Image: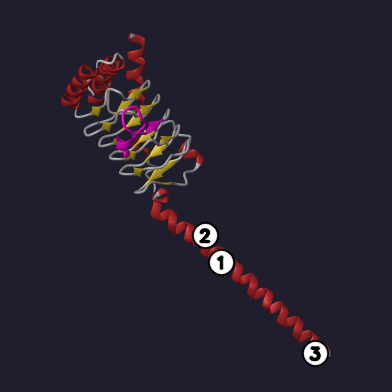
Amino acid sequence: MLHSLVAYLDSIKARDPAPRSRWEVLLYAGVHAVAVHRIAHAFYRARLYWLARAVSQFGRFLTGIEIHPGAKIGRNFFIDHGMGVVIGETAEIGDDVTMYQGITLGGVDPSSGKGGKRHPTIQDGAIIGANAQILGPIVVGKRSRVGANAVVTKDVADGATVVGNPAKPLLVDAKVYAKDFLAYGTPCDEKYDPQTQKLEILRCEMERLQARLAALEAEQREKQDNRASRQSVG
């Protein structure tokens, strides 16, 4: 158990340059929220629902992070800063996931009733940027990144980076993807801005059309030259 705790604290230090020791990491609200959730989830699995809810509400009061006791959370889950995070009952979070403040893993179909899957599944190694809203029983793939303030209502492929409202994928090069960790889930480079990428696509399309026009003009000139040659011979 001690070994697992040390490994967990070290995984947080690897993703956050601020703490200078494991003792400092132990003061993090995100660490407290996850610890309280482990207790609440144990009560939930034992069908002690009122007690589970009471423990989770205590954790919410203590940390400002609301995690439903029914949510399933894997190893090394790190909530950085954390205030305002909401994680719904049927949410599932894999190993080594990182989330920031203001995030909602919400359900959009209350008609599914108890026992139905209403909330997202976040797979291993995903990074969710601040204030992102991930809604419905969708899947955010392994090592994917969701940018700050994104609104995600559709599945995110493994390794993809999505931004915007509604969230759309960015074209991220292999060097950026290969990084072990990308803070807030978004490359801080103008070339990865969605508007910049749209302009780049338009520029490429314009170049293609210009090349096509030049080829047609050259073909037309060649036909005219051939016609003129035949008329001079005749």
Residue pictured at 17% horizontal, 22% vertical: 58
Does label 2 or label 3 sit earlier along the sequence? 2
Q: Nearer the viewer, residue 180 or 159?
A: 159
Disc 2 crowd rating (10 Å Cα; few below 14, some 14-19, many 20+) is few
- Rendered location of residue 163, percent (x, y): 37, 45
- Rendered location of residue 80, percent (x, y): 28, 30
Q: How many marks?
A: 3
Q: Which residue is mark 1?
A: 209
- Amino acid on which disc 2 is placed: Cys
- Image vertical order of residue 226 relative to residue 104, above or below: below
Q: Helix, strand, or loop for circle 3? A: helix
Residue pictured at 35% horizontal, 23% vertical: 73
- Image vertical order of residue 177 relative to residue 214, above or below: above
Give the magenta-colored segment's residue range: 105-122
Residue 196: which quarter of the image? Answer: bottom left
Quarter of the picture containing the C terminus is bottom right
Q: CA distance from mark 1 to mark 2?
A: 9 Å
Q: Helix, strand, or loop for circle 1? A: helix
- Amino acid on which disc 1 is placed: Leu
Residue at the far right: name it: 234
Q: Which residue is mark 2?
A: 204
Q: Which residue is mark 3?
A: 232
Does label 1 or label 2 sit earlier along the sequence? 2
Residue pictured at 29% horizontal, 34% vertical: 100
Disc 1 crowd rating (10 Å Cα; few below 14, some 14-19, many 20+) is few
- Amino acid on which disc 3 is placed: Ser
Residue 179 lies left or right of residue 184; in this view the side is: right
- Image vertical order of residue 221 relative to residue 96, above or below: below
Q: CA distance from mark 2 to mark 3?
A: 42 Å
Q: Helix, strand, or loop for circle 2? A: helix
Q: Nearer the viewer, residue 130 or 87?
A: 87
